[in-house]
Image: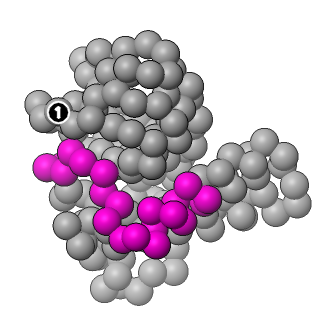
Amino acid sequence: MKKEDTQTPYEITFITSNACSKFEQRHNFIELIFIRSGTGKHYLNHSECDYYPGHLFLITPEDTHHFEVENQTDFFFLRFNNIQIEKNNFSRQNLQGLEYILKNASHINECILKNVFDKGFVPWVIEAIYKEQTVKDLYTEDMVHEMVNTMLIIAARNIAKL
């Protein structure tokens, strides 16, 4: 089994895949995975879930997971660690709640987006991140940082409602 690590507060990756990635992964960071397009199956801790465009998955540390791609899929991966959470201006109570929610959701193998507004907003945020990283305009790093924080809060809000 492949074990991944991240040394930076967060990493963003956009990947297009036609292939089945049947190897299981485990990592020591939290990961949000958004399906921009495509269909297939997601396996998380021995449970199976179909995925479709607009689905957002949360992978917690020590989860095992992999994807089986049925139709070419565009993935968005946001990997982050405690440094990203702790260095923001969240209140102490909100910080503790956010960390707890994001680290203890390993049983959820379904799209975590339950809030109707967030279902429409998340694709917009992800496309804005993609454009910022592609164009590299003034304040790109700051813009991406704030959009990453937005994604963390959206994930926590939706998981809290499950």
Q: Residue visible at 29% across and 16% down?
A: 23
Residue 108 appears left or right of 54: left
Q: Residue visible at 52% across and 50% down?
A: 10
Residue 56 appears left or right of 134: left
Residue in the foreground of this view, choosing between 77 and 71 = 71
**Residue most extreme to the right:** 138
Image quarter hosting the N terminus? top left
Please tell me whether residue 149 is drawn above or below residue 7 in the rendered image: below
Residue 64 appears left or right of 52: left
Residue neighbourhood size for the residue with mark 1, other residues' Cα within 10 Å, grouped as few (<14), some (14–19), many (≥20):
some
Regarding residue 152, the answer to whether it shows in the image is no
Image quadrant where residue 5 sits? top left
Residue in the foreground of this view, choosing between 69 and 44 = 69
Q: Whole-percent x and y of residue 102?
A: 29, 61
Read off the magenta span: 106-125
Q: Is residue 112 magenta?
A: yes
Q: Which residue is mark 1?
A: 48
Q: Residue visible at 27% across and 76% down?
A: 97
Please tell me whether residue 66 is drawn above or below residue 100 in the rendered image: above
Regarding residue 12, the answer to whether it shows in the image is yes
Residue in the foreground of this view, choosing between 40 and 12 = 40
**What secondary structure is marked by label 1?**
strand
Image quadrant where residue 19 sits? top left
Image quarter hosting the C terminus? bottom left
Please tell me whether residue 45 is drawn above or below residue 67 in the rendered image: below
Residue 136 appears left or right of 133: right
Q: Whole-percent x and y of residue 12?
A: 57, 43
Q: Is residue 71 magenta?
A: no
Task: Name the residue type under label 1.
Answer: Glu
